[in-house]
Structure formats: structure tokens, C-alpha cells
């Protein structure tokens, strides 16, 4: 359980922060950038949920679960698994699971089954909710790039479910944007070279 009695601690004033393992790292390290981008994704999903108020209650509930999952993902990244940080007690570190990835895949498949196949790329926009979901999708892709960069760094570890989850999430946000655009009927498609 997390208990936050005091919001500022001054411990990061010199440009470092503590990981979930207790190790201190620079605030601009790849790991901090990765879970910071996950936090931005969570905020963007929150904005999309505000745009959905009163419409699409099933999608809103799905996005609420995703926001919670994104905190799980951030906790996974915050406490990297290495030989030195393996838990010595019975209490395990919180990790993203394959079940969470599978749930996203099932939700993508269910939404996508109701959409007509695409004949071109979709321009971000349509309804305000779709535009917000497209923004969340692009922020999610940035988080994915940060996580991939971290995973490629020598000596760093990122669990495979984290990589799969963040990749699937951007796909889900794309399909969700089409769903709220009247099942894709209000999508505006890219017309290559239209304005030349």
C-alpha cells in the first residue's frame, strides 16, 4: 500500500530520484524517462475519458482499467528485476502480466470486429473524444520508444510483458478512436498528395 503523507521531500533537489529498489538514479536516466512517458500516457488517457463523459460507458470502463494497468506498468519499470534486486521476502514486486496483455488483445479484437476495414491511414480527429484518443495513442507510442530504448541499454532489464502491453495499448487506443467516430463512419482518411 502506498502512503503519501508529505508531497515534497527535498531528496530530489540535486537531480536524482529513488527507484522502487531504493537505488538512486539521475532524473534524466532512460528508466525515469520511460516511466515518466508512461505517466504522460496515463494523463492523456484521462483526458480522453473526460471527452467521453456520458457516452461510451463500456469504453470508459475499459480506459479506467487501463489507467490502473499503467500504474502497474510504471511500478514494474520503477523496480527493475536483476539478480541483485530479487526479493528476499515472500512479497513479490508488482509486474505486468501476460493476462493484462491478453485482455487488451481481446478488447481490440472485439472493437475491431465492428469496424469496416481501412483503405487508407486515418487522420487524427473526427469527434473530440476520437481526437483525444489519437493524442493518447501518440503519447503511448512515445512511451513505447522510451521503453524500447531502455530495454536496449546494456545492463538494463525490461520484462517482455511490459513491451507487449505498451505496444498493444497504442493499437487499442487507435481502434477506440475509430469506435467513438461512429464506428469509423466519421473517420477522415488520408488522401496521399491531395493538396499538391
Image: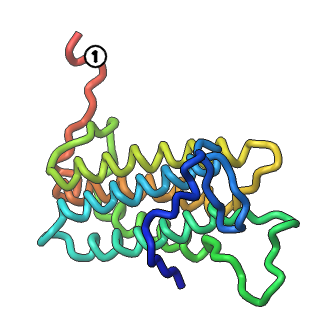
Where is residue 51 shown, x and y percent of the image? Answer: 18, 59
Q: Nearer the viewer, residue 149 or 11?
A: 11
In the image, 117 versus 70, the foreground residue is 70
Bin the neighbour count of mark 1 within 10 Å (Cα to Cα): few under 14, some 14-19, many 20 and up: few
Q: Is residue 194 left or right of residue 91?
A: left
Image quadrant for the C terminus? top left
Q: Identify which residue is drawn at 76% across, 65% down.
A: 81
Check the image and report above or below for 193 versus 83: above
Question: 144 or 150, which is in the foreground?
Answer: 150
User: In the figure, is residue 20 to the left or right of 112?
Assistant: right
Q: How is the image coloured?
A: rainbow
User: Residue pushed farthest bottom?
Assistant: 90
Where does the image place residue 28, in percent across and percent down from the top left?
A: 59, 42
Q: Quadrant of the N terminus?
A: bottom right
Residue 114 drawn above or below residue 89: above
Q: Is residue 87 above or below residue 45?
A: below
Q: Quadrant of residue 47?
A: bottom left
Q: Residue at x 23, y 47 (%)?
A: 131
Which x, y percent locates residue 93? 68, 77
Q: Secondary structure at mark 1?
A: loop
Furthest residue in direction top, as rendered: 196
Foreground residue, 161 or 41?
A: 41
The residue where tag 1 is placed is 193
Establish if 89 lies above or below 173.
below
Farthest residue to the right: give it: 83
The residue sitting at 20% across, 39% down in the picture is: 188
- The answer to whether residue 190 is left or right of residue 82 is left
Q: Residue at x 27, y 71 (%)?
A: 60
Amino acid at each position: 500500500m502506498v502512503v503519501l503523507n508529505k508531497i515534497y521531500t527535498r531528496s530530489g533537489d540535486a537531480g536524482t530520484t529513488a527507484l522502487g529498489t531504493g537505488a538512486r538514479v539521475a532524473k534524466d536516466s532512460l528508466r525515469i524517462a520511460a516511466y515518466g512517458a508512461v505517466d504522460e500516457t496515463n494523463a492523456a488517457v484521462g483526458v480522453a475519458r473526460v471527452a467521453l463523459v456520458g457516452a461510451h460507458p463500456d469504453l470508459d470502463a475499459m480506459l479506467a482499467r487501463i489507467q490502473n494497468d499503467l500504474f502497474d506498468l510504471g511500478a514494474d519499470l520503477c523496480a527493475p528485476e536483476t539478480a541483485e534486486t530479487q526479493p528476499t521476502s515472500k512479497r513479490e514486486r508488482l509486474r505486468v502480466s501476460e493476462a493484462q496483455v491478453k485482455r487488451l488483445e481481446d478488447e481490440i479484437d472485439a472493437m475491431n470486429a465492428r469496424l469496416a476495414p481501412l483503405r487508407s491511414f486515418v487522420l487524427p480527429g473526427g469527434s473530440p473524444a476520437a481526437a483525444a484518443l489519437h493524442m493518447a495513442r501518440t503519447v503511448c507510442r512515445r512511451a513505447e520508444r522510451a521503453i524500447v530504448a531502455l530495454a536496449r541499454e546494456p545492463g538494463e532489464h525490461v520484462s517482455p510483458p511490459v513491451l507487449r502491453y505498451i505496444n498493444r495499448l497504442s493499437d487499442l487506443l487507435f481502434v477506440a478512436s475509430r469506435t467513438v467516430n461512429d464506428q469509423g463512419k466519421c473517420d477522415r482518411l488520408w488522401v496521399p498528395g491531395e493538396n499538391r
